Amino acid sequence: MAGFDGKVAIVTGGASGIGRETAVRLAAEGCRVIVADINSDQATETAAALATNSIGFNLDVASEQSWDDIMTCAENIFGGLDILVNSAGVGFADNFEDMPLENWNAMISVNLTGSFLGCQKAVGLMKKTGNPATIINISSVMGLVGGEDIVGYSASKGGVTLLTRSVALYCAGKGYSIRCNSIHPTYVDTAMLNPIAEALGSREVMLAGMAAEIPLGRVATPSDIATAILFLCSADAGMITGHQMVIDGGQLAGLPAQHSPG
């Protein structure tokens, strides 16, 4: 893909799952990557294995000071910022009537406030850096439709969807060369699904059940999502901003067959 060599990227949640795969792929294309994660040891370990001069960073996405610190790091060590991928996220499945406030607060704090702070701080440094730049926010298919047992998660990811559109319009309106898009995956086979697998007693049973909901017949992989992220970050996507890229194997396309005998 075009336009990555020498660019500087921050990937949150970069120590595992979608974030880690994205960091690996960006580095393979020539980006210098700041692998940002609350798990600093794993972030440093991931950065050390990348193909370019990259570093790990202990980032609490819900902390404004932590975001100020990582932007200072990007400017002082790498000279600026060209790409931000807001991949850090948490999710809890709850009965809505019994959902603990702490679960709601955690999802809003990490998923929505974390993305807001990332966008806000990144725009400031990106416009100072002066290169064409891009922000990718990881939302979810559940940021486009509701879910009866994941009310808080859907609400937080829905907020990310409209945050993305609004940031895209803001940057365009200001004349900044900064694009902002969101990614909306279906189920992705990462450690985030571990609690569900444990509750069902089998990862294979869980994945089979999830795959049955997806027309293409399988759960997404981190590589599926990272490929889409790289496209939206590339110069090839230079006319795309404020867009919601759905990666769901057809899950949201419509209803399953139920109107005819067979």
Image (tube, helix red, strand yellow):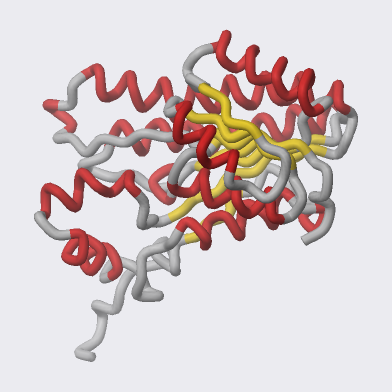
Quarter of the image for the C terminus: give it. bottom left
Where is residue 148 drawn, in percent x and y? Answer: 23, 43
Query: Residue visible at 50% across and 13% down?
Result: 63
**In the foreground, 90 or 108:** 90
Quarter-wise, where is residue 180 in the image?
top right
Q: Residue at x 20, y 48 (%)?
A: 196
Q: Which is more toward the observer, 160 or 20?
A: 20
In the shown orientation, is residue 194 left or right of residue 95? right
For the N terminus, the quadrant is bottom right
Percent across and percent down for residue 170 are 74, 27
Q: Is residue 151 at all visible to an observer of this figure?
A: yes
x, y (%) of residue 259?
26, 80
| Residue 230 drawn above or below residue 7 | below
Q: Is residue 165 at all visible to an observer of this figure? A: no
Q: Residue furthest top?
A: 65
Q: Which residue is at a point 89% across and 29% down the rendered structure image?
A: 130
Front position in the image: 172 or 125: 125
Residue nearest the viewer, comparing 156 with 233: 233
Is residue 42 toward the left or the right of residue 74 in the image? left
Relative placement, left or right, of 144 versus 49 is: left
| Residue 139 location (% of width, % of height) | 49, 42
Number of marks in the rendered image? 0
Q: Is residue 244 above or below residue 81?
A: below
Q: In this rendering, would 117 be left or right of 101?
A: right
Q: Is residue 219 above or below residue 116?
A: below
Residue at position x 61%, y 25% in the image: 118
